[in-house]
Amino acid sequence: QRALARLDESGADDHATRIDALEGYGSTLSRLGRFAEAEQRLQQALTLAEAEYGSQHSRLVPVLTSLGIALDGQGPPGRSAELHRRALDITREHRGDDHTITLALRNNLAIALGAAGDRDGEQRQLRELLDARLRLQGKDHPLVGMAYQNLAASLAKTGQFDEALTLLARARATFTVALPGSHVRAFPWLTEALIHLRRQDPASAARAAESAHEVLAAALPVGHYATGAAECLLGEARLALGGREAAAPLIASGMVALAPRPHGDDYRLRCEAAQALL
């Protein structure tokens, strides 16, 4: 903001500096949750950058990405997908498919497509990302584990449970090697619990949720969101198995942890539904 003020006071027509200042200020506003203001500043930066550099210059990529993040923060879902796609296309042209930035931007696009409900598009990007990470980093790299996990989570949402479970097993194997003490090891168990609940298999869901909760309780503080998600899934599974008394405190504790989450959060919605059955 001070850089912009100095430019205005000096009357200088330095577009490159103004673009940098607008992009930096907009990104800061996004981090503060002031997404509408961020969008305004970043749109100004993009307009200037396109005029200064052209529509396919690599200097547009951070502006496009920051603007996409600002749009994601405001909703509705899906507004940012074309911005993320454009950033990816420009970066592929300049840096190739295997560059670290290209891979990060592909992940951004997958997230945006998934938020918009385009599961086919999301899964195409996630498969390409997984293939690239396996080729470049090997099966024991933590980012490969996350690629397995993210693709499995998307497949689970479209009912492709068998493939999702296979990928989750691979994610667990990767995390066991790459992140032996991390709470991230619980994520595949959480997704597996969801799959078993959707398959009407509460016994398997309870085992998966218990495994997730064991990892999370050892690695995270009491009341953490992820631990609350595991408690709610375990409570839901035990309730389906007829264990109302065992389920009630788990669901109550989980709801406390999940209460700060947005109303549309999947785990919070499931926990609220389970709580309504008590």
Image (cartoon, rainbow, N blue to C red):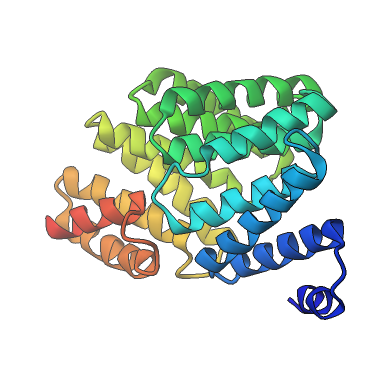
Left or right of 150? Residue 227 is left
> At x 61% / y 52%, what residue is drawn?
67
Task: Tell which of 236 and 204 is nearer to you.
Answer: 236
Say which quarter of the image contains residue 276: bottom left
Q: Is residue 86 left or right of residue 72?
A: right
Residue 73 is situated, as x and y percent measured from the top left of the image, at 49, 58
**Which quadrant would residue 84 be assigned to in this image?**
top right
Residue 181 visible in image:
no
Q: Nearer the viewer, residue 167 or 73?
A: 73
Position of residue 201 relative to residue 127, above or below, is: below
Residue 193 in the image, given as x and y percentages of width and height: 37, 39
* Above/below status of 225 relative to 236: below
Q: Is residue 268 left or right of residue 143?
A: left
28 up-or-down from 133: above or below: below
Residue at image position (48%, 25%) is: 121
User: Is residue 102 placed above or below 19 in the rendered structure?
Assistant: above
Q: Quadrant of the N terminus?
A: bottom right
> Is residue 126 among the parts visible in the rendering?
yes
Q: Quadrant of the C terminus?
A: bottom left
> Dividing the picture into quarters, in which one does residue 252 lie?
bottom left
In the picture provided, is 220 more to the left or to the right than 234? right
- Residue 274 position in % (x across, y down): 20, 54
Q: How many marks?
A: 0
Residue under the image location 19 percent in, 50 percent down: 239
Pick the residue in front: 136 or 31: 31
Residue depicted at 53% across the width and 24% down the height: 167
Residue 94 in percent (x, y) is at 83, 28
Q: Please name whichever residue, 272 or 60, is drawn nearer the observer in this view of the structure.
A: 60
